[in-house]
Structure formats: C-alpha cells, structure tokens
Amino acid sequence: MSESGENRISQRPKRKIYDDNLHAHFVTFSCFKRRRLLNPDRAKAIVIGNLHAQLRKRNGLCAGFVIMPDHVHAIVWFPQPKQLSGFMNKWKDQSSAAIKQLFAASFPAYWATLDATDGVWQPKYYAFNIYTRKKLDEKLDYMHKNPVEEGLVQRAVDYRWSSARWHILLKPVGIPIHCPPGLED
C-alpha cells in the first residue's frame, strides 16, 4: 500500500456510539470474514440464548432480531444510559465462546481449517439510534426481510430465527419481544 493510502486509513475518524440517552439501538454485527458460522441451528440458538441472558442482566428489552448465517441484527433498549457497549461486548464474547465449542465438538474437520486466532465475530459492531416509531417499524421491516432477500424463505414469518413471527402472528420466538418505552403505537 502506498504511503498516502496508509495515511488515509490512519486518518479515518473513529466511529462514535451515542448511548447517553434512553433510545433504542438497532445493532448489526457480522461473523469474522463473513463466514457462515451461524448456518447451524444450534449456533443461531446460542446467539438468541445469549441475547436473552445479557438483556435480563441489564433489564433490557428486545424489540426485534434476526440471526442470519453470517450476521445478526437486533433492536435493544436499556432503562439506563451507557449500557450498549458493555452489553454488546458480553453478548459477543459469550456467544463466541459457545460457538467455538460447538464447532470444535460438532464440526471438527471444518474447525481445523480455520486459523486458531480468528474470532467468531468481526471486532466492531454498527449501532443506529432509534428515536421514532416510524424508524422502529422501518428497521424491523428491513431486518425481517433479510431472510427473504437471501432466499432462505419465501415469507418473513417462515424464518424461525427472527422476531417476524411475533410481530406478524404474535407467536413466540424464543425471547420476550417488547416495544421500547416511548415508541409504542
């Protein structure tokens, strides 16, 4: 890489997460190198289980989620500010350790092909604050359409690893789904 290219990279502004107010957060994070480590249903169940456990520890709410083969979307809310970073770190750390154990035990041939120093997740996550019901509905619709657009199902409600069934049919999805305060209809 040229010196000017290196300078451009080092001069990029650091991404800032705004978590000083009690807004809902639309979060997205991906598997390292966009590997499809979440293809096995047990891996998806690990992510949902850890989401639920970490939300309970912080009295947080989940307004929606989708677990795709290579990335995760969720909308979360906390009753106190400055919870998002710690929540995301724990959610990713706990689910990463369990997914590594799953692959080592159940898919050892595949796991052996990966570099032992590679993580399960990309180091960072993307967070978008949600202030209005209109934006909440827009983000829910976007994430629920992911499995359809990827050709995993024909209808969003048919994808087992998302909150679409709750939002459309009021059927259980593995964790409680609640609208964040201030964004109710």
Image (spheres, rainbow, N blue to C red):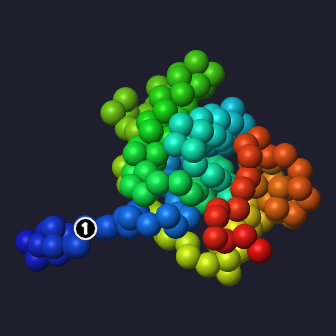
Which amino acid does the dot numbered 1 rest on? Lys
| Placement of 65 over or under 109, stated as above or below | below
Quadrant assignment, res 13: bottom left
**Does residue 163 appear in the picture of this structure?**
yes
Q: Looking at the picture, tell me which residue is in the foreground, 34 or 29.
A: 29
Residue 41 position, x and y percent, is 72, 37
Q: Residue at x 64, y 62 (%)?
A: 180
Residue 14 position, x and y percent, is 25, 67
Determine the secondary structure under disc 1. Answer: loop
Q: Residue at x 64, y 70 (%)?
A: 182
Q: Looking at the picture, tell me which residue is in the foreground, 7 or 2.
A: 7
Quadrant assignment, res 117: top left
Residue 52 position, x and y percent, is 63, 40
Quadrant holding the N terminus: bottom left
Horizontally, residue 141 falls left or right of residue 34, namely right
Quadrant assignment, res 71: bottom right
| Placement of 122 over or under 110, stated as above or below | below
Q: How many marks?
A: 1
| Placement of 26 over or under 46, stated as above or below | below
Residue 115 position, x and y percent, is 37, 34
Quadrant holding the C terminus: bottom right
Horizontally, residue 7 falls left or right of residue 85, namely left
**Does residue 92 appear in the picture of this structure?**
no
Q: Residue at x 73, y 64 (%)?
A: 144
List the single residue furthest toward the top: 105
Q: Residue at x 53, y 54 (%)?
A: 78
Q: Residues within 10 Å of mark 1 (few under 14, many from 20)?
A: few
Q: Looking at the picture, tell me which residue is in the foreground, 16 or 124.
A: 16
Label 1 belongs to which residue? 14
